[in-house]
Image (cartoon, helix red, strand yellow):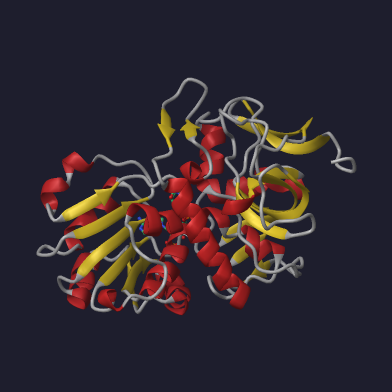
Amino acid sequence: MSSIPTTQSAYVINGAKGEVKSVAVPKLASGQVLIKNEAVAINPTDWKHVDFQLGVDGAIVGCDVAGTVVAVGEDVKGVKVGDQLFGLVSGASAITPENGGFAEYSAIYADRSLKVGNKLEHAKGDSLPAGPVTTWEGAASLPVGLITSLIGFVHWAKLPIHHESKFNDQYFLVWGGASSLGQLVIQFAKKVGFKVIATASSHNFDLLKELGAEAVFDYHDKDVLEQISKHAGDDITYAYDTITTPPTTLNVYSVLSKTRESVLLTSLNFDEKTIKEVNPKVKAIDFPLAYLAIDKKKKFGATGFEISSPAGLFEDTVKGVSEVNEGYAKDPAYLRHIPVKIVRGGLSALDEALDIVRQGKNSGVKIVVPL
Ligand SMILES: NC(=O)c1ccc[n+]([C@@H]2O[C@H](COP(=O)([O-])OP(=O)(O)OC[C@H]3O[C@@H](n4cnc5c(N)ncnc54)[C@H](OP(=O)(O)O)[C@@H]3O)[C@@H](O)[C@H]2O)c1
């Protein structure tokens, strides 16, 4: 690590705000590589960790990173200095506050990192449509949504991420299909062979159809549930509620199959007891938390509650990531990246970039900051 500095600039929590500060470059744990970040992306979890003080003071914020490997830790196989990776960092962590995404350097686990060859370049202009992963900005748009949906499929719902004909006659409903998470869930569900339907604002219909949805319904319509049931009948057996507010979860319960066992994945914690009676056939998999695919524990806030990674999650993530990387090695459009809105200005632009997501002004797009 001789040519790597010992200090770096990073965006850290200070009270209920963030600030750019000089901090130490993180040390590598076994299995990790150090990447020099080329682009980072914003997720709702980032501003929530700042505003609701779910992290700790001084913790580096940020989870979505794409960059070049500059150092390789112990017990790393198949990754070398110079490789281009994109991955998930446990940003704003109360357990590992010294490592986060909004920094010049991040430590990421090599076996749970994504790669599409070594030819990524910076995007020109201010935006990118959904497409093959050929740019740092497109790559940075993916890790959180990709890993969260991947573990939902391979670990929690025990679904494959390649075609199986037994699912051809079943519908997979993605509530909140235009969210970052939703755009990845649609693509995975289509790969498995489900007939995919989604909800979104009407201006996002074409995007979601390009990603694999056969029909999209406007969740603002009063009769959206009737529209969905008219289209899919009693054949919706899987759903992902990527929004997970009481009304969205209630909506999904009410359109899932009433006669067959069905599975519901949610993006946040919810109280199953209060709505179970709406549809007793639903098996809800509560809160498949992406942080637990990379860390043994996630702690919310300095004194908050702690969740541990369940047995088998790391192994399932490693296997799933390996299958995704095989897909990317053959085709950079294996999973298309989310449409990107680029906010320039490096780490100093993070307040502005976080505000866009905080205010919900990121309809169908990922806010990405090149570094
Ligand atoms: N469990 C985990 O590890 C994990 C991982 C990632 C995210 N999350 C959580 O999952 C949620 C989504 O995250 P994200 O990054 O995917 O969000 P995002 O990209 O910021 O989502 C924005 C989209 O949500 C859609 N939306 C908002 N309200 C909706 C509603 N009532 N019905 C349908 N769609 C609605 C909007 O669609 P339109 O523009 O089409 O209206 C908007 O485009 C957040 O709460 C986040 O914290 C959890």
Q: Is residue 290 above or below residue 323?
A: above
Q: Quadrant of ligand 1?
A: bottom left
- Residue 231 at x, y = what percent? 22, 77
Is 257 left or right of 188, judged from the image as shown? left
Q: Against 44, is 224 above or below?
A: below
> Where is residue 6, by image quadrant?
top right
Asked if residue 81 shows in the view, the reply is yes
Q: Residue at x 32, y 63 (%)?
A: 220
Most extreme residue toward the right is 3
The residue drawn where x is 57% and y is 75% is 333
Is 11 left, or right, of 166 in this rendering? right
**Residue 155 placed where, x, y %?**
38, 53
Q: Quadrant of residue 195?
A: bottom left
Q: State the residue in front, 337 or 115.
A: 115
- 245 and 305: which one is in front? 305
Query: Residue 9: which quarter of the image?
Result: top right
Going by the image, does 189 lie left or right of 49?
left
Q: Is residue 370 visible?
A: no
Which residue is depicted at the point 70% across and 69% down?
Answer: 117
Q: Quadrant of the N terminus?
A: top right
Give the mark count. Answer: 0
- The residue positioned 56% from the left and 28% from the top of the image is 94
Percent position of residue 11, x then y: 70, 37
Q: Nearer the viewer, residue 164 or 261?
A: 164
Residue 12 x/y as whole percent: 67, 33
Q: Is residue 2 left or right of residue 269?
A: right
